[in-house]
Image (tube, rainbow, N blue to C red):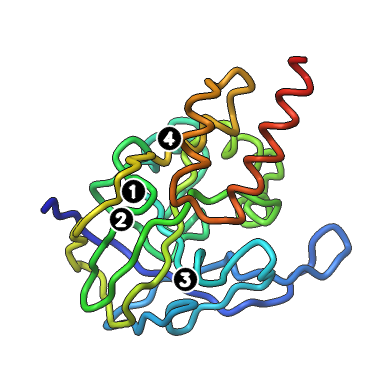
């Protein structure tokens, strides 16, 4: 089994902030924590999601972002000091990218077990976090979305833990495959079908059905 590592854990309670004259509830301003952190079915100890219609729940309990993608963003945004956790992730990981992580991958960290459920679709709060509304579209077009995890066994994790890939499913649909289905209007129908038949989280399957129908109507 391949092993990777957990570089940083970040959490935040939801809070109200002022944005364009409105009060917005968000948990995206996550801060690093040290020591052993309890992993529960719906989130990490000390963490909270504000809008449960698009974040949180069993399929999106924990958000991970590969440290490998920070090199890309530092080239794209050389003026910014992007610390780990800048994209609102709970876990900054080493040894993963969109081409190597598959939907259904089983991961073990510390005494907790997880399964990869879907990539993270950016929302406007990423623009708030990075003080740049254009980042939502740039993040979307990059396909470097990171991934959500469901918790299959509660336990404890801490920075420095190895991440053990303990199994996968038969579909072998990568995060990049899923992203291409959304980003490319000319994506192959065969790939869309394979993704829809995979163990991708139900909410993202619904989004893909809608996206695919929209693309077909434009091309027809």
* Callout in the foreground (4, 3): 4
Q: Do the residues labelled 1 and 2 touch (CB within 8 Å)?
A: yes
**Residue under label 2:** 93
Give coordinates of residue 69: x percent, y percent. 38, 41
Q: Which of marks 4 and 3 is nearer the N terminus?
A: 3
**Residue under label 3:** 31
Compared with residue 125, is residue 41 higher up or lower down, i.e. above or below?
Answer: below
The answer to whether 195 appears left or right of 5 in the picture is: right
* Callout in the foreground (1, 3): 1
The extreme right residue here reads 21
**Front residue of this view, candidates 97 and 136:** 97
The answer to whether 70 appears left or right of 193 in the picture is: left
Give coordinates of residue 174: x percent, y percent. 38, 39
Residue 189 in which image quadrant: top right
**Residue under label 4:** 176
Q: Which residue is drawn at 66% across and 45% down?
A: 207
Give coordinates of residue 199: x percent, y percent. 44, 51
* Callout in the foreground (4, 2): 4
Compared with residue 153, is residue 29 higher up or lower down, i.e. above or below?
Answer: above
**Residue under label 1:** 67
Compared with residue 218, is residue 8 higher up or lower down, i.e. above or below?
Answer: below
C-alpha gap between disc 4 and disc 3: 28 Å
- For label 2, the SS is strand
**Front residue of this view, candidates 207 and 47:** 207
Q: Which of marks 3 and 2 is nearer the N terminus?
A: 3
């Amino acid at each position: 089994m391949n092993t990777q590592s957990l570089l940083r854990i970040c959490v935040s309670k939801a809070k109200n902030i002022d944005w364009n004259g409105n009060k917005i509830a968000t948990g995206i301003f996550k801060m690093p924590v040290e020591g052993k952190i309890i992993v529960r079915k719906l989130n990490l100890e000390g963490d909270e999601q504000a809008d449960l219609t698009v974040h949180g729940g069993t399929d999106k309990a924990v958000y991970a972002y590969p440290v490998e993608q920070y090199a890309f963003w530092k080239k794209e945004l050389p003026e910014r000091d992007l610390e780990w956790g800048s994209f609102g992730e709970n876990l900054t990981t080493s040894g993963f990218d969109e081409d190597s992580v598959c939907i259904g991958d089983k991961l073990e960290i510390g005494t907790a077990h997880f399964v990869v459920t879907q990539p993270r679709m950016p929302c406007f709060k990423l623009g708030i976090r990075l003080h740049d509304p254009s980042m939502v579209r740039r993040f979307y077009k990059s396909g470097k979305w990171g991934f959500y995890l469901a918790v299959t066994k509660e336990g404890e994790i801490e920075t420095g833990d190895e991440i053990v890939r303990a199994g996968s499913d038969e579909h072998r649909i990568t995060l990049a495959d899923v992203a291409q289905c959304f980003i490319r209007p000319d994506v192959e129908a065969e790939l869309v079908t394979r993704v829809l038949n995979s163990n991708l989280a139900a909410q993202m399957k619904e989004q893909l059905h809608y996206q695919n129908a929209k693309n077909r109507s434009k091309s027809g």
